[in-house]
Image (cartoon, rainbow, N blue to C red):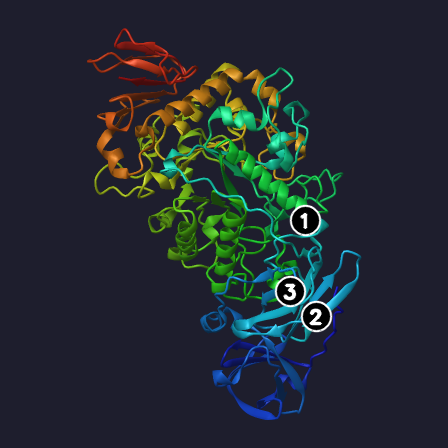
Amino acid sequence: MAEVLVISRQYDAFLDTFNVITMILPYDYHEGNSNHFTLIKDDEKVALHIEEKIPLNDAMKYVTTIQSEKIILGDSYEIVDEHGTKTDLQIGAVIRTEEFDQRYYYDGNDLGVTYQDGCTVFKVWAPTATEVRLKLKSPDEEEIQYPYTRMENGVWECRVDTDIEGYFYSILPCINLVWDELIDPYAKAVSLNSEWGCVIKQGEKVAPLAPLASPTDSVIYELNIRDFSAQKESGMKFRGKYSAFTEKGTKTPKGFSSGIQYLKELGVTHVELLPVNDFDGVTDNPSDTNYNWGYNPLYFNAPEGSYSLKPEDPYERIRELKAVIQSLHDENIRVIQDVVYNHVFVREHSSFEKLVPGYFFRHDENGLPSNGTGVGNDFASERLMARKFIVDSILYWIKEYGVDGFRFDLMGILDVKTMTVIREEVDKVLPGAILIGEGWDLNTPLPPHQKANLRNAHHLQGIGQFNDWFRDTIKGSTFNLYDKGFALGHGHLEQKVELVLTGSIGMKSGERGLFKEPAQSVNYVESHDNHTLWDKMKACMNEDEETLKARHKLATTMVLLSQGIPFLHAGQEFFRTKKGIENSYNSPIEINQLDWTRREEYDEVVRYVKALIQIRKSHGAFRFQKGDLIREHVKVSHSKENLVDVTYQNVHPYGPWDEILMVFHSDTKPCEYSLAEGKQWICLSDGNQASVSGLYDVKETSLTLRPVSSYVFVR
């Protein structure tokens, strides 16, 4: 690490805007009194005008003003008070002003390292630094330092005129007279346990697949790299590693498909990977048994080491992660990357905070870091260079790794403008790529209209959001274990069920739905967060196992056959359990791993879910792109409690059937039901079995619906 200089100041002076300097004089220094202050740079002296004098608990605060053009960041200034005592001018809240953002915004696309055989260029944005040095470490451990040169807009550049491929590097900025050491936030590769950035030569890129015609054509399957193959019954050799995704033809002990073959057979269109960028909570040591989902981001553009077979080799990590994506692409499965731009692991240790202290994170009205994320910091996406970092990072993952879409963790912390810019920039390179996020309303110091949350969904066109109306209506509240939704037998929710089955767009004219278009609604009853559906039911339902399975299938059927984007949590199709643990982000692998023996045990349910996915894909009416088409063709009725039916009429232009009827029944008693007269109906699904080519012709128009069941009839 850089040597830390201990600085002794008798009083402090801070630049809070380009024309306001605040002095803090402790009462034990001349009783906190000074009648005048002067700014000194080289030989030039400028008198400061005292505007206000504010007594604090242990010091006197002076607010002084100066003409803003006098201050140039990166230069050194001193303040002298009436007693002739000097102190250095420190960078204060000026970094959070609009003027700072405008003055120092840099729009180049070359931050980080640009490697060439004969000359490597390092660029870093550090407008408040007075000096910056580069520390290089060669493969044989020799360390050498180079100075950076200050360029415009607060960017510093260092050119090294030798071939330094494979060298490790760190950045040493000097800010407010203090030297610090950090890894480049733009680092594309890091060393073992994230101790250094690494200079690499880019290898072969992976190309994204062409996006689907509409996000509503997607079926998303969320999984964690480690969970997927960790169990020995998975039949995969590279358990818990990236490389498991490249293994072909793997099988469970009883000979059922597993691994990538299983995903292909299931028919999902997108796999959503929990974070694969470098994170904390698990070291890169293969013997480390700690578990973490990956929501402790360290370096946003470098692959995580603990999933690699050779984490000490930065190239190997990159190759392995690209191979995961390529392998999924080879099976025509697109990859959504779960990205965590809303916070960092520890603010004080983060590269962002060390590079431009106070800039990249939100602060409240008292100047303290805000904590809407609940993990100690909120990334200030509304600041120009913070927004730029996010956009640059997103584009890097698309262009270099061929990522097909993104899921934004705690998107409600980010601002509407940033998400809109991301949508625009992604569309320039991959038009129609899927962008979805968690639009929860979180307590962060952004004006309400600027938060990228569900409330502002109408201003976030082209961005899907996890629909908690859907989740809580069908399953029951996530935050109240004993609250039951429609699929769990709660009556009187039929009106809400109508809303969520139709994309949450509002069916009547003039009715404002949650979303403008169905492609904004991500429909789910289970994800990596909170109890699995099976575990919630086990805890809150006093029913036999067969009834619970029927309820589970009913909920999953509603996810797959609703308007919007269906989202499955890995293993949901075989009643995934985490042994009752609600928040398993750091529970042992035994809790989190996918249990492939359940995949064997419940193969019949897996086949049922697979058939439902085929049915969804077979007819465009299940996945309308526009709200107007839903309003035109779809009718929902709910004459009885615990019974909702959905009729699609005149939909032959969109697929093989002209009329589709779906019936969802969540009561534990059988129920009499009459089908509309006319042409003969065919049953595609009865809640236990399903087939895109039809299970049987329906002979009678009056039926008895089984307890807790669902049906799809077509004609």
Spot occupied by residue 671 in the image (x, y as percentages of width and height): 33, 13
Q: Image point 67% across, 62% down: which residue?
A: 182
Q: How many marks?
A: 3
Q: Image point 50% across, 67% down: which residue?
A: 106
As drawn, 457 above or below 386: above
Q: Which of the two discs, 1 and 3, labels the residue nearer the N terminus? A: 3
**Callout 1 amino acid:** Pro
Toward the viewer: 584 or 593? 593
Q: Quadrant of the C terminus?
A: top left
**Callout 3 amino acid:** Cys
As drawn, 597 above or below 315: above
Spot occupied by residue 99 in the image (x, y as percentages of width and height): 46, 73
Which residue carries the number 3 mark?
A: 119
Q: CA distance from mark 2 to mark 1?
A: 23 Å
**Callout 2 amino acid:** Tyr
- As helix, strand or loop, the secondary structure at mark 1 comes to helix
Spot occupied by residue 141 in the image (x, y as percentages of width and height): 79, 58
Which residue carries the number 2 mark?
A: 146
Q: CA distance from mark 1 to mark 3?
A: 20 Å
Toward the viewer: 571 or 11? 571
Q: Image point 39% across, 53% down: which residue?
A: 424
Q: Image point 36% across, 47% down: which residue?
A: 457
- As helix, strand or loop, the secondary structure at mark 2 comes to strand
User: Where is residue 5, by image quadrant?
Assistant: bottom right
